[in-house]
Amino acid sequence: MASQIEKKLTPSRILIYATLLLACVAYLIPVFIMIITSFKTTGDIRSGNLISFPEVWSFEAWAKAWSTACTGVQCNGVSGFFWNSIKMAVPAVLISTALGAINGYVLSKWRFRGSDIFFSLLLFGCFLPFQVILLPMAATLGKMGLANTTTGLVIVHVVYGVAFTTLFFRNFYVGVPDALIKAARLDGAGFVTIFVRILLPMSVPIIMVCFIWQFTQIWNDFLFGVVFASGDSQPITVGLNNLVNTSTGVKEYNVDMAAAMIAALPTLVVYVLAGKYFIRGLTSGAVKG
Amino acid sequence: MKPIRHLLAAIGLSFVLSPAHAGQVEVLHWWTSGGEAKAMGVLKEMMEEQGHTWKDFAVAGGGGEAAMTVLKTRAVSGNPPAAAQIKGHDIQEWAKLGFLTNLDDVAKEEKWDQVLPPIVSDIMKYEGHYVAVPVNVHRVNWLWVNPDVFKKVGVEVPHTWDEFFEVADKIKAAGIIPLAHGGQAWQDATVFEAVALAELGPKDYTAAFVNHDMDVLSGPKMVEALTKFHKIRDYIDPNAVGRDWNVATKMVINGDAAMQIMGDWAKGEFTAADKVAGKDYLCVPAPGTEDSFTFNIDSLAMFKLNNEANEKAQMDLARTILRPKFQTIFNKAKGSIPVRTDVDMASFDDCAKASMKAFKSTADTGGLVPSMAHGMATTSAIQGQIFDVITNFFNTKDADPEATAKQLASAVQSAL
Amino acid sequence: MAHSGVVSETASQPARGRLTQRLQQWLPKLALAPTAAMALVGIYGFMFWTGVLSFTGSTFLPSYEFVGFEQYAHLFSNARWATACANLAIFGLLFIFCCLVIGCFLAILLDQRIRNEGVIRTIYLYPLALSMIVTGTVWQWILNPSLGLEKLMHDWGWTSFKFDWLTNPDMVIYTIVIAAVWQASGFVMALFLAGLRGIDPAIINAARVDGASLPRIYLRIVLPAMRPVFFSSVMVLAHIAIKSFDLVMAMTSGGPGYASDLPAMFMYSFTFTRGQMGLGAASSIMMLAMLLALLVPYLYSELRGQRNG
């Protein structure tokens, strides 16, 4: 908001920069610790301290976490869990975003009697404490023959994710002038045409927001994963938790941290690559309430 | 002609080798620490030798809490595993709900009634029918000792709680952690159970934790037990919070700590570290409980399945578990003793031999009591209430034993 | 709701065939149908189901023997439930407050034409991309007295340094606040920054010309304009606070004792591990009630905003 570009380094600006840098350090340190620890050897961990650099940079812990670390009896590392998460997250993100876009479009541009009530009722899904639905959901999935399958997990994530995507898209489309839609209707465009030709092309930022949000939520979910999946369909968070809790006498913090990094990498990569859409999307979406 | 005959023979053989009844057994368990996982690997191999596929369903963490969550949702969804690690009162609960399958045929064939002590087989039966297979017997009231530490400090292994505190003071003064402990509710309860057994004696212990006698639960002996239990706080290190039991065992192995109160599954960790019982480590009954045996029996409950091949595999699993061969291999790896009293103990170590001897003798004297901390004594609801009171008491700095004893009684009452 | 968007106003179009027109009218509702079905069953149906369970004596699988309000009576006399609720109050309030203060403060600083703003912003925001399980694992290690921060300070010669909150039953809930604030405050910063960018610079310039100081401008003009951002943030944070189950699980498992228990943990453990499903269902219904107390005002303002705009 300071509209004049300030080039002078006044004392107050130095203070601002110092504060911002300090905050950067605070945010970075935990992951910094994770990374250096994952490259240490077990001996290194004992002799060094929290933020000392490894004596030798070793990829051993990473290799072990990926392919040979034990979770229970199986010693295949977290690689299998990793692919499970991919198989679960990608369809769930795509489906919930698509549904959210359509819902948002209807709820902002084709409002009907009761659509606002509907939206409010749906919004509640954003805040539902998921414990409430665990058992009924399990029973329902079982009757549908989808218990402990990746498909079942995808459905669960779509059902409880669609409230968020709808919220994002609705708030975004509310900002699109109605006149634009009206003009298109006069030109004879219908429900589908307006959506595909007019709204979708301008939705890239909000689609990115949805992708990031949903991917992060679904990838990082633990509760659904641990309850609705078993053995060969469990996602990475459950794998990580099992790995960390499978202690064979000595806590191998380097392997734990490497596994944690593996679990965190996809969301971090998505975030770093697409992070700019995050802010842009937020400006046009979530903030407008 | 010869090669062709060989070929034909080979084909014939391959048919024999891939039996038509090959099924899959999915086994849910939380034996995930070193010794335990190794022991489970043995069962896996033996099942695979019989041509079945083993689907491991290990859910680590929280002494089986996470595993039970998964099991319930699986059962509700109509897709239970073939076998699950369920024990004590929970077996009855599951059977009551109609989830468990009848194992009487296998039991008859294998003469389970003859080889299992009644106190064990009673737990495995629901309305007179076998629904679960016992895997092993653990003694919970053990004190694990690192003799080197004791020698260095110059103290003797304690036999009563008063001796324990005396010894612990000296060990602490020497800069060593007297008692290795993990601050998880079930571990707190395991230690408490040992103190309570010493203070109450087997009869009142049973009155309190099995029959829920309110006068005993809130009585003066219980107050004394709580007071001693709270004193143990002073002899554990501040980092015990949340520590896994096997990490605590490692502290005894390495000499960072002098003792640990833990069931004999701890032995698996000593064995895995190539330590020899009686030399590198000692196992003695927990102070004041020489003449008692707190038992914890692990068992696999068998669920009703709807696939014939898998059912066959399930029955083979039940059969295999109680065969002496598996009992010997498994229990040596796990640190427990066989449930069959007719298994030859010669190849077991001193601790297991002592355990077996105590198991047989306490069964006659009445010193054989079910472990409260391990779900043998009471329902999981009451056990949970006791855990809450005990763990909160143990973790509160200036807790009042008398008020806690009353609280204990009312907590049990509320879950009856 | 007299007006209904643009649909009704365009109803008097030249005739294009009755079928197409009827289809056009039904299409929007048809498009909502899958979501409506999912929400009806997945949210409200299942919620009702759990509500029913809370009035039964269900032990460790659902049963339908009704016991009235007995489970609720048990719940309110349970010492652990009281601890869990007190913890949620402490955790929720502190977490939301700290996130708002830190987020808002950093957003204002970042809004001062900062070099490399993009990089700094990215750094502040990245923890939100991490799983709570990951966050819990790493913070548990940092705060572990024998391995983490305390050891580091001792190594650096500050031997009297003591930071044992993780193992201290009275302080442990604050360690969870620390980890949660670390994870979510950047998100709040982003929300506020986006809000700040939406304010017309002309207003500020006018105030400056009038001789108002910068802090005064922010306090009097900018912050009041941030009201919607503030509400959005509180809602997102409340949601995270309720989901913090994973974080507690990974960091303390509710310990020491049950000192860091939260209602979500309580419900999980009673329903699934204690075999007291009725009680667990009752506790989850209580959690719902707490949420409703927060949500109703929010949804009200949401709807009112729509009518005005």
Image: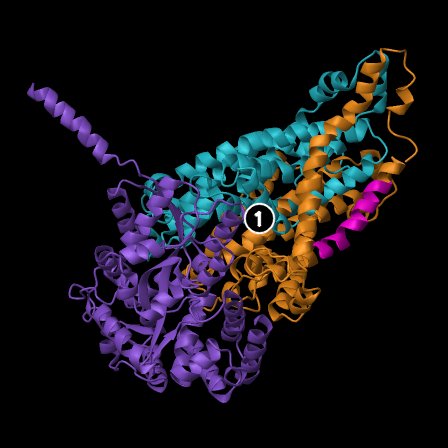
- Front one among A197 and C221: A197
- What is the x, y in percent for residue B7? 14, 23
- Front one among A82 and B29: B29
Instruction: Based on the picture, tell me whether residue C300 belongs to the magenta stretch.
Output: yes
User: Regarding mark 1 in the picture, which secondary structure is present there?
Assistant: helix
Q: Is residue B182 left or right of residue C109?
A: left
- What is the x, y in percent for residue B233? 44, 76
A176 up-or-down from C196: above or below: above
Residue C249 in sight: yes
Chain A: drawing colour: cyan
B77 up-or-down from B251: above or below: above
Residue A65 in sight: no
- What is the x, y in percent for residue B83? 39, 51
Provide the residue span drawn in magenta.
Answer: C288-304
Most distant residue in the left direction: B2
Q: Say few, some or many: other residues with alpha carbon within 10 Å of mark 1 (under 14 / 14 to 19 / 20 or more).
A: few
Residue A76's image quarter? top left
- Front one among B159 and A18: B159
The amino acid at mark 1 is: Leu
The coloring applied to the image is by chain
Chain shaded purple: B
Chain shaded orange: C
**Residue at label 1?**
A22
Q: Is residue B21 left or right of residue C36?
A: left
Total labels: the figure holds: 1
Q: Is residue B254 left or right of residue A186?
A: left
Which of the chains bears the disc numbered 1?
A
